[in-house]
Amino acid sequence: MPSRPAYRAATPRRAAGAAALLAAIALCLGAAPRSTAGSTDATAQGCPQRVATPAYKAAVSRAVRSARDLWGEELLARRDGPTYAAASRYLSPLLLGQQRGRRALTRSGVYYLPFAFPLNVVGPAVFALHVADGSQVITRNVNGPSLTVRVGPYGRETYGACLARLTPAKLADGYLPILQTGYRDMSGVRYQQESFAGRVDGSPSIVSFIKLDVDATASARAAVVRLVPSIPKLSAAVDRLLTATGARLIVSDGGAYDGNAFRFTVPAGQTGVVYALWLNRPASARKLVADETTYEKIRSVVQRFWAERLDAATTFSVPEPRIVQAQRAMLVQQVAQTWRYSAGNPYEALSFVEALDTAEVMTGYGYPDVAKAILGFSLQRLAIRFKAWRTGEHLTALATYYRATHDRAFVERQTPGLARLLRRIAHNQIRSGPKRGRLLPEQLSSDQPQPIDGVTAQIAVLQGLKSMAPIWRATGHRDLSAYARTIQHRLERALRRAVNASMVRLPDGSLFLPESFGRRGAPYGNLSVSSEGSYWNLVVPYALASGFFPRGSAAADGFIRYLLLHGSRMLGVPRADAHVIYGKRADGTNVPGTGGLGQIYGLSVARLFADNDVPDQLVLSLYGQLAVGMTPDTYVSGEAVSVVPQGDAYYRKTYMPPNIGANSTFLETLRLMLVHERHGADEVPRGLDLAFSTPRAWLGDGKTIEVNDALTSFGRLSYSIARAGSTVEASIEPPSPLPSLRLRLRLPAGQRLASVRLNGRPVRFDRRTGTIDLSGKKGPIELVASVRGGGTAG
């Protein structure tokens, strides 16, 4: 039995508590124009509601109507460039989750975090969904059994129901899958809640651990905590609720079962602690108790597991804690979800292109086991759900994996299945006529049922063939390599002719590439206004970043100009119509005046910018993604994110969160800023660019950037750049003498490099960009640079 009481005595302060409560309510009502005081729902009585003001809605509408990234351009024009703080001022927080049919994702409407404790990345996933307002823990998926936390003087107020009294969610240590929230109920009682998922010895089930600190010292009324399971007909046994097969809920000492819920009472003027264990699957768990000892023991196991898992891989350390924490939090999600597009909702399935993007990203972050799990499952499913585009993306991802790991055995296992897919691609090549060499039309996506003569799909196949053919040759599959080359050459000749005939040069100097060779309409003036333009914005950048168009060419410049001038981005995040959130009119057209974001599809745009050396846009994307594309401090996003308020709603919505593609976009953007591989037209890696796109503030006085043990196509790489006063020191351990290795020192505005020395000898550098060519230099490389102008303040 638990050794700790459910509450502990404290000095009563009832009179002071009542005064503080009245002051707090007055302050909230003064700050919010609406209240639900007339509601009969105990969870909402007297709760002020934040609403979107007319001025806010007008500002958002103006930004959405513009074909330019008005807000992004404002940030780029600042002397210090984009920052997270500046980017987060434009839009209200992302808080609510939505699913199909425009239904709320959870009972409260707030998104959840899918917590897991994976022992390996290939085993079955077991998720516990912890709602970010602290209201519920849901078993496995949104329709599963749940445990609801209720508080207040009668235990009828759902924890977190009044958002004005909720302390927003954050993660322990900024990144761990341990959810922390605070809440104040209608009587002024304060609560601190922490929850996570772990495993305990002797239990096959994942267990959600909940700790609720109750502080009624400022309240004139007792606090009642009720833990309400959704499962009917549970039997009670002292400290637990049981099904026929074992315990489902275990609680700490001091609770009483009232036939509906476990109930705890903390007297006015006192404090208490309630512990609860919610098992995803019933288990005997006879020795398992809910107390401080058990809670802290398993919490430390979870903390140690994830810290060690992340520290064992590549680490990108930058002088901005939020960026580092976001990176680590998203890596936790990626390891837990592997190939799953989402978790805990109907999107928990393989979405090929996004999953294969994630395989590449996780390879670059030093998680080859995650990449292998994705590639293995993708190949199994491709045998059943073949599409040329998916196959091309798979080939590219496998090539990326092999170049970084030289895992020949895995390539051997994948090759027989891929050889069969190559034959299918060859079978789909048109044999005669003006389209000779191109591929037959295929369906673009599940919600675009008609086959199209897709530009992106065919270019993706070409990229995959170019990437994988030399690897098959290097691993002894010469015949398969030659076969891939034959398909590649036929396809490339046909695509060059078709693409050149399809491109449109606009009067503003931008260049437009249609998504389909069969489309002959005019270029989109504002991409996010229509569903067709939104699909272009999500799909065609894959082609633009594929290497089909030479990096740094006039064509690449024209495409980038089109993206920047024709409604592609908002605060550096890809725009979309977000019809899954807003719905459509009866005639199937978009609801007028709506607009959203599709962060998932920023990954290819980030690669396009990195390949063409557009660093400021990458910086804008990094901060925009965190500020408006993800939930604050928990770093969750979905397939689409709302921008325009729905009615007077203040908080924004995201569709089917969480999403591995959104995470991969952020992670890839960060990596490209620090480590960028340059490829030739043949997709063979040619060299490395280090720190080419970092925010300028990261090299202010006292700042340090470190990359440790990064996997690249040339081998493992580590480097550090440290600034002290007017001196910058850089230490690089390159994988080997590279044909091309460049380092860039992006200094704060008004500052420039005065000199650079390598082993005491002067080195030439580009004074405009701060780029230093280190090609052919043997490691370790030690550089010392002096800075002039603008002072030394960061």
Image: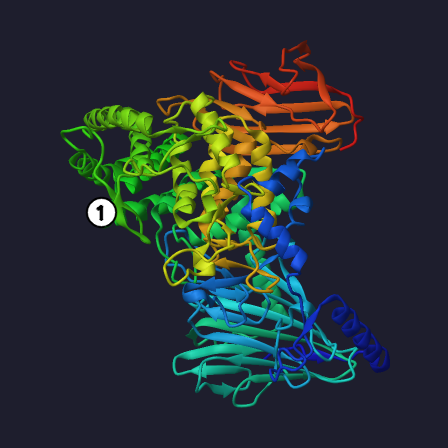
Q: Is residue 596 left or right of residue 318?
A: left
Q: In the image, residue 96 lies at what x, y percent?
A: 54, 63
Which residue bears the numbered disc 1?
383
Give the residue type at disc 1. Answer: Ala
- In front of the other: 586 or 322: 586
Residue farthest to the bottom, as pictured:
259
Residue farthest to the top, as pictured:
761
- In front of the other: 77 or 375: 77
Point out the image quarter for the N terminus: bottom right
Rendering quarter of residue 412: top left
Point out the image quarter for the C terminus: top right
Q: Image height check: is 361 above or below 437?
A: below
Residue beneath the point at 39% across and 31% down = 546
Residue 252 visible here: no
Residue beneath the point at 49% across and 60% down = 114
Residue beneath the point at 43% across and 46% down = 534
How busy is the neighbourhood of tag 1: few (under 14 within 10 Å), some, or many (20 plus)? some
Q: In the image, residue 291 lies at what x, y percent?
A: 61, 73
Rendering quarter of residue 349: bottom left
Q: In the image, residue 670 lies at what x, y percent?
A: 55, 38
Q: Is residue 368 left or right of residue 1?
A: left
Q: In the image, residue 143 lies at what x, y percent?
A: 42, 71
- In front of the other: 638 or 294: 638
- In front of the other: 278 or 386: 386
User: Number of callouts in the render?
Assistant: 1
Residue 568 visible here: yes
Q: Secondary structure at mark 1?
A: loop
Its colouring scheme is: rainbow
